[in-house]
């Protein structure tokens, strides 16, 4: 089935009252493992590139990433979407659209609501010419190493503004802040599920939850039934990649560096397969 519009995949998740999982993956081994794990689980999946990774991993530019995911996606039968994660650089957004990404996220969450809306509308206008979906963020999802980011309700998405933002911006999906954060959590997150229900009641747009690594499964499964149609996962995948590398290098039988990609992909494929059990969406 190969590459599918992200909007279509999100609609599939919404109809199934669940979420599709989107993995930040930055090199061939990670992308390959995500697709293999999703194929094994028989579930759609999104491969995401974080612009920060494209900065320090020079070989992972959007111009390389887009075609690489598209070529690997031809080898599987599940729907695959290609998404550029948090981006504020208009030129990079255009580059991603030109390079085969069929979804991008413009992150104006650190701006005033008026500036965020204005810029998101401009990105949506350009993206339409490319046939690309746009994810926006309202409220602000911070970082887990700053516990205050999880608890500061001033940063949370306000239900009364969500519908207007989606309607006026024209965004495809909306990332919301309800108590999650990026990175390793220092304390167990407690999602504001009541706020989620209130936001979901105001708009038909698919809702996105960032910071999916470390949120208890029981909370996630409830969140999926209340409007979260896309769950972002990155930290866990990268950490499992690190663990795989350590295990391989410490193995007494390790004597051929060319065996590492296979070993890493096997480890990550199993992780992705198990993580996808969170989603009830099957093909």
Image (cartoon, rainbow, N blue to C red):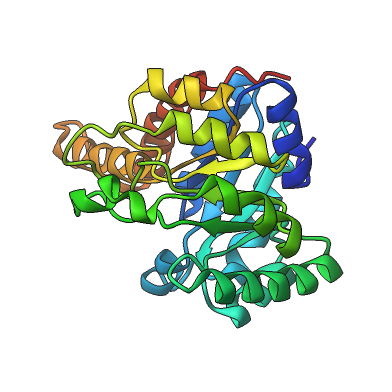
Q: Nearer the viewer, residue 203 or 50?
A: 203
In the rendered image, residue 101, in percent from the top left (x then y), is placed at 69, 60
Residue beneath the point at 33% across and 39% down: 236
Q: Is residue 195 left or right of residue 40?
A: left
- Please state the horizontal and vertical placement of residue 57, each as a whole percent of the image: 39, 68
Numbered circles on residues, count: 0
Q: Percent from the top left, x then y, of residue 44?
A: 66, 31
- Whether residue 75 appears in this view of the structure is no
Residue 165 at x, y percent in the picture: 65, 59
Residue that appears at 22% across and 37% down = 254
Q: Residue at x 65, y 46 (%)?
A: 72
Q: Is residue 129 above or below residue 246?
A: below
Residue 39 picture quarter: top right
Q: Is residue 66 above or below residue 88?
A: above
Q: In the image, what residue occupies the spot 58% across and 49% down?
A: 160
Q: Is residue 3 above or below residue 269?
A: below
Q: Is residue 220 left or right of residue 5?
A: left
Residue 23 relative to residue 69: left or right: left
Q: Quadrant of the N terminus?
A: top right
**Image quadrant occupied by the C terminus:** top right
Q: Is residue 281 visible?
A: yes
Q: Quadrant of residue 259?
A: top left
As drawn, the residue found furthest toward the bottom would be 91
Q: Is residue 25 above or below residue 14?
A: below
């Amino acid at each position: 089935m190969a590459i599918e519009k992200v909007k279509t995949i999100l609609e599939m998740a919404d109809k199934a009252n669940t979420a599709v999982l989107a993995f930040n993956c930055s090199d061939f081994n990670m992308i390959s493992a995500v697709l293999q794990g999703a194929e094994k689980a028989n579930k759609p999946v999104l491969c995401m590139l974080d612009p920060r990774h494209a900065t320090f991993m020079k070989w992972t530019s959007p111009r390389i990433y887009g075609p690489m995911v598209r070529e690997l996606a031809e080898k599987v039968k599940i729907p695959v979407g290609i998404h550029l994660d948090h981006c504020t650089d208009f030129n990079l957004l255009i580059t991603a659209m030109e390079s085969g990404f069929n979804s991008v996220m413009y992150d104006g969450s650190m701006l005033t609501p008026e500036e965020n809306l204005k810029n998101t509308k401009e990105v949506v206008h350009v993206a339409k010419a490319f046939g690309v979906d746009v994810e926006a963020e309202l409220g602000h999802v911070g970082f887990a190493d700053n516990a205050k980011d999880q608890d500061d309700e001033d940063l949370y998405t306000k239900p009364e503004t969500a519908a207007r933002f989606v309607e006026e911006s024209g965004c495809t999906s909306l990332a919301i802040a309800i108590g999650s954060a990026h990175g390793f959590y220092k304390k167990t997150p407690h999602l504001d599920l009541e706020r989620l229900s209130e936001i979901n009641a105001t708009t038909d747009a698919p809702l996105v939850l960032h910071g999916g690594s470390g949120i208890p499964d029981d909370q996630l499964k409830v969140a999926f039934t209340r409007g979260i149609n896309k769950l972002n996962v990155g930290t866990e995948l990268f950490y499992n990649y690190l663990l795989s590398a350590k295990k391989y290098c410490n193995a007494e039988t390790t004597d051929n560096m060319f065996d590492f990609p296979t070993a890493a992909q096997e480890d990550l494929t199993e992780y992705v397969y198990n993580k996808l059990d969170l989603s009830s969406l099957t093909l």
